[in-house]
Amino acid sequence: MNARPQNVAGADPSSASEAWRVPSDPSLFVPGELQARALMSHSLSAMWIWLGRNVAPLRTMVHEYHQNWVIVGSRIERLDPVSEADADELVFWVSRVQLRRAGSMLDLDVDVVAGARTVARVGILSIVVQFDDQSMAGAPGTLHGALQRGFAAHQLDPAPPTRRVPQLVAEIERGRPLGALEHGFRIHRHHCEVADMWCFVEVPTLAAEARETLAMDGDSKELRRLLTRPLALLELELRRPFYVLDRGRVRTAGFAGDDGRIGFVHRFIGPVGDEAVRGVVVEKFLT
């Protein structure tokens, strides 16, 4: 279950100079597992360490090439239980890299190591955005040829990545409904990244807030029991941004599958009157 992917980008994480090492501290954990936000945030740091050493750091991409990576999807897979008692530090390192669709998409995995165990894997999917000197706003583009030379031949793949979220949504929604709600939110600056739009690391926290509200305010004992159960899988797909101070809603629904596992589908939509789906988060829990 902890096997390393075949398209390895780095070396052994115990000695890799590209690894991002994080001392264990209480803010990384909730009882029995790592925080989803912490996993995504530190995986993003590992991604930029790899890019900085192999392709270009953020400053060079933005100010010399007028390009940036915008996150459009992410995934967390829990591979092994972990707590603050298991290791003095966590090591985040890029284990798989693919530059897809003629250099327009970056698809990579970050392995999370505690001691000698790979305890989680975080996938990050990004698109290239090209912008002008006056603004961070831009349009989808293709990575500059000089930057593409930072990728090895086996890391180039013309195919698009598989969209797993629609498949997972269909699978979960075939289950037995356990409850649903619509939960309002507002995007504040601490939810944002440099372009003042929502940052992908904050999206799971908004989904979790809706899920926990459903568990506490509803009458399902199955949902309430999940408050102490670890998350097995999280997948998110972002289609359209929210910007700072925007209001939005998340429509959350929980389902029990035939295997006894409980899953959630969270659809992020705009304020009342705006029904376009801007993002989807799927969660599956261990039982």
Image (cartoon, helix red, strand yellow):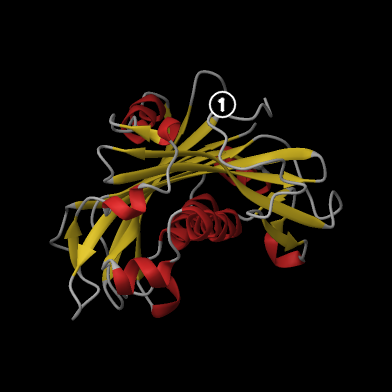
Which quadrant of the figure has residue 82?
top right
Is 75 displayed left or right of 186 in the figure? right
Residue at (25, 73) in percent of width and height: 136
Please state which amino acid type lies under the numbered disc 1. Answer: Gln
* Mark 1, residue position: 6
Q: Is residue 159 above or below residue 234?
A: above
Residue at (41, 33) in percent of width and height: 153
The quadrant of the rendering that contains the C terminus is: top right
Which quadrant of the figure has residue 160?
top left
Could you tell me residue 36's position as x and y percent?
A: 57, 53
Could you tell me residue 4's position as x and y percent?
A: 64, 30
Could you tell me residue 98's position as x and y percent?
A: 41, 38
Residue at (68, 55) in percent of width and height: 17
Is 20 displayed left or right of 174 in the figure? right
Q: Residue furthest top?
A: 258
Which quadrant of the figure has residue 12?
top right
